[in-house]
Image (cartoon, helix red, strand yellow):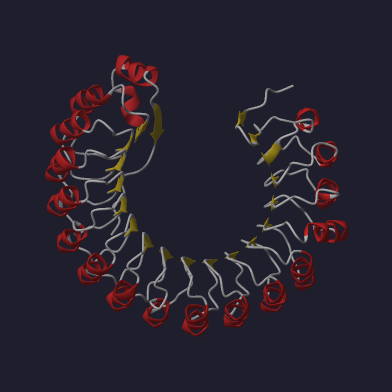
Amino acid sequence: MVPLHYTICLYYMLIFLVLQVGNGSLRSISSLERLEELAMVCCSCIDDEGLELLSKGSDSLQSVDVSRCDHVTSHGLASLIDGRNFLQKLYAADCLHEIGQRFVSKLATLKETLTTLKLDGLEVSDSLLEAIGESCNKLVEIGLSKCSGVTDEGISSLVARCSDLRTIDLTCCNLSTNNALDSIAGNCKMLECLRLESCSLINEKGLKRIATCCPNLKEIDLTDCGVDDAALEHLAKCSELRVLKLGLCSSISDKGIAFISSNCGKLVELDLYRCSSITDDGLAALANGCKRIKLLNLCYCNKITDTGLGHLGSLEELTNLELRCLVRITGIGISSVAIGCKNLIELDLKRCYSVDDAGLWALARYALNLRQLTISYCQVTGLGLCHLLSSLRCLQDIKMVHLSWVSIEGFEIALRAACGRLKKLKMLCGLKTVLSPELIQMLQACGCRIRWVNKPLVYKD
């Protein structure tokens, strides 16, 4: 039998099972009297028989996760639920080939306790969502990410009975329209998190209803929804907003960012990936109105220059900054960020072709908390790289592919300076044959995992 990996706490037991655990282990686990949470993600050796064994054990179990357990069916889950009136959370993402009637009927026994249900990646129907609403009206979180068959009618039936919902995940439910948002807004007044990635049929009309009726909204994901500045004008009413994801929404401009910045001062995460109309003016508004930003993604926003990065330098709480393929920024802009954002932990500068040693020297001097850095394709030299790696004592992960200005000797000296601290390293596989075997062995002996890649030198705008 494969040994179990678990953590025992004073008042509860939480177990994360390793991939090879099978039904025999569940027989042993079922005898644990204080077991409250059990995660079996990707345990392909577990099937319905194992869940049947688990169902005969202690009644203390409150949370079960069988996500991506390929041999678990809804029949097995029904057996597990049977008689367990205290189950609060059930995660069954990407595992059930179909949802049987027995499972649906057993959900009714959890009517007073079940608060979280995640069915991501499954095939659902309007009647199923209606049945879930009737059986589980205490739900505060429902996960339907990438579920086929989710329609406006199904969502309407669900939320009409589950008015306590605070988190709704409709990622890639691309049949959903403004009618679904209207139903959510009308019923779920306490909504805090709404994930709508790739729901391309929604627009500012539906979001206006959400913003008006759900004043507690803290997170919304609109990635690849094609929303524009008009939608952001409505969302700006949500003064409690913490997380806003707008990646691939190319119609968003500085005007929309100004709307958000005017009233969403509690924002801590903003994703503007490939929002290519954003300029330095948008960053000026953001830095002025959203001082609490910690995570910011500006990858491929290629109108941004060093002036924009100068504005970001005032975001003292910034920890994660992604600037991939900002071809107009230089070491001057990176210096502004390094000097002002001293809490920076992760920085992505891949394909920032004009970033040079000046940027690395600034990072080496000021970004002392930096743990993860990507400088692939940057115009840095061995001197700058060596100074960086010898100075940043917290740096654990660095990606440096196609540093054409760095010599073999430069790599050798820089890596020796960081040996003992680096845990992850990404470099061209061609370097594997020219760097000294002793250096590579020394890095690996110190716990560094080296990823050798074979990528052509292709420049992108």
Residue projecting furthest to the bottom: 205
Q: Residue furthest right?
A: 102
- Give above or below for 297 relative to 350: below
Q: Residue at x 50, y 85 (%)?
A: 205
Q: Relative to 231, is 133 on the left or the right?
A: right
**Which of the 4 image quarters holds residue 429?**
top left
Q: Could you say where residue 319 lies in the image, as x and y percent from the top left?
A: 31, 49
> For this rendering, which residue is in front, 28 or 61?
61
Q: Position of residue 203 (x, y in %)?
A: 49, 81
Residue occupying image coordinates x 78% and y 45%: 72
- In the rendered image, residue 233, in percent from the top left (x then y), is placed at 37, 81
> Is residue 176 or residue 353 the one in the foreground?
176
Using the rendered view, name the quadrant where residue 407 is placed: top left
Left or right: where does residue 128 sit relative to residue 318?
A: right
Q: Quadrant of residue 367?
A: top left
Quarter that holds the C terminus: bottom left
Q: Residue furthest front?
A: 11
Relative to 38, is 224 above or below?
A: below
Quarter of the picture holding the N terminus:
top right
Across and down, in percent, residue 375 comes to 27, 43
Q: Residue at x 26, y 26 (%)?
A: 418
Residue 223 visible? The answer is no
Residue 358 seen in this snapshot: yes
